[in-house]
Amino acid sequence: MATRLRHPLVAVAGAVALTLPWLGTYLTDSTAALGTVGTVAVSGVSVLGASFLLAWGAETAEKDVPRAFAIAVLAVLAVAPEYAVDALYAWTAGANVGTARGAEAANLAVANMTGANRILIGLGWSGIALFTVYRALGSADPAVVREPGFLRSKVQLDRELATEIAFLLAATVVAFFVPLGGGIGVGDTVVLVGLYALYIGIIIRGDVVAHDDQVGVPAYLQQYSRGPRVATVLLLFGYSGAMIYTAVHPFAHGLETLGVAFGIPPFFMIQWIAPLASESPELIVVAYLVNKARSTAGFNALISSKLNQWTLLIGTLAVVYSIAAGSVGALPFDEKQQAEIWITAAQSFFAIGVLTNFEISVREAVVLLVLFVSQVAAEFWVVRTMAEPQASELSLLLLYGYTVVYMALGAALFVARRDEVRAIFERTVANARDAFPGGSEAVDHAD
């Protein structure tokens, strides 16, 4: 007998149900009654449910807006908690200028930002690439190309990502110069936020392409007439965004508390565990898309998230700091955080080099993963086993050493793929001309 298909709205109701325990806890301000473990469990489950709602909203929106813009909105909402956490540290730094507390908060803001960005590439890009290839073993995914040889299978990316890659490379170049200014200043904000605004201005003017590959919830919601469909998308975005925003901070804080109880240094927790928690909605959404054999859309979301974090997140820090300080100023940081910014920029440089041919192989994903994990593990070992000042000195050497490795690998890729890099910028310029009044004809994105 044929299995009866479940109505798509049952899945929506199930996802909403996952958020309700946290919603009740938040509205009644009863997190203290749950305790640390209970808060982590309830808020974590809510993040999971909200992530599904967010993904369905973005997929449904593709019927009315360009896919790149829908994914950009998804990316911003998914990582909004990261902005909130970093903004809190930046505000504390600005409100306590010239004090030890202010200096510590400024360093924590930078550490949290660099940790989030490195996690997104080191675990996100690499992990999702590996999961995509693994998932293709049991189901067809047109983006996965299986090739003979050790770790040579690869995921092919959408060539429409040329614009994102070009802007991400531009933001990365700017980031290398940020430490030279003595802090993250308003000038950095203007340049980086300006880059993101220009990017949004280009993609929002793109064509709306009909996608017939939707199934399940988004396929059902796309059948609504335009008015109810748009209202549904806005409701999904609004509700899921609110749940993620309110739940991720208690989730992250609870993980920090549990980590400290197990002897993990607080600074290490804030740089790595808290950002990992705040990145979880994004990673859940992408894993969901890959599981539906929509790995192209999943990687679009990952790259869009990296772009908005590498521009808007950095720019937000200087603005919040200046408002809290009551005057225009630059968010200061010490030599350690200067090195953290450089290694983060170097990792971004290498990762962009990997994507310049619009592919990421299993071998490249493993390199990204191993470099990230080994650096974090080595630094953790240093801070846990060595006393100051030797620990700080060795930690800096590790950061500079890995920065050199990332830069060397990235430079080799850019030289070897210089024709692809040139084509990316030509495609991006053509897209920009087409997006604004008086531009050229629509650019042909075909191979």
Image (cartoon, rainbow, N blue to C red):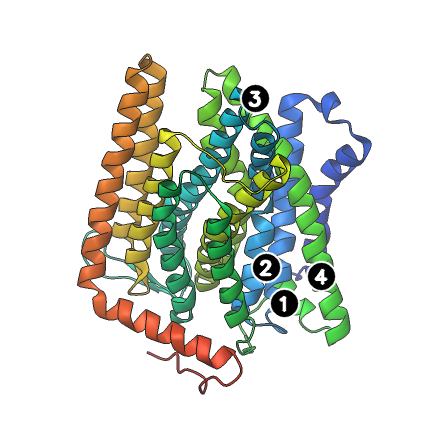
Residue type (three-letter) at the residue carrying disc 3: Thr
Of callouts 4 and 2, which one flags the residue occurring earlier in the amino acid sequence?
2
Q: Which residue is mark 1?
A: 61
Q: Position of residue 355 (x, y in %)?
A: 32, 60
Residue 214: quadrant of the picture: bottom right
Depth check: 391 or 186 in front?
A: 186
Give the quadrant of the C terminus.
bottom left
- Locate residue 115 relative to residue 229 in the image: left or right: left
What distance separates the C-alpha of mark 1 from that of mark 4?
9 Å
Q: Which residue is mark 3?
A: 257
Element at badge 2? helix
Q: Residue at x 56, y 21 (%)?
A: 257
Assign a secondary structure to mark 3. helix
For the N terminus, the image quarter is bottom right
Q: Residue at x 75, y 35 (%)?
A: 26
Q: In the figure, is residue 200 to the left or right of 15?
A: left
Please report whichever mark, 1 or 3, sits nearer to the chain's N-terminal start: 1
Residue type pointed to by label 4: Leu
Amino acid type of the residue tagged 2 in the rendering: Val
Category of crowding for the residue at label 3, using alpha-carbon neighbours closer than 10 angstroms: few (below 14), some (14–19), many (at least 20): some
Query: Whole-Å distance between the Cαs marked 1 and 3?
Result: 38 Å
Mark closest to the chain's N terminus, 3 or 2: 2
Q: CA distance from mark 2 to mark 1?
A: 10 Å
134 w.r.t. 208: above or below = above
Q: Which residue is mark 4?
A: 234
- The answer to which of marks 1 and 4 sits earlier in the sequence is 1
Q: Which mark is residue 167?
A: none
The residue closer to the viewer here, 289 or 340, is 340
Along the viewing direction, whichever of 146 and 301 lies nearer the viewer: 301
Pointer 2 residue: 73
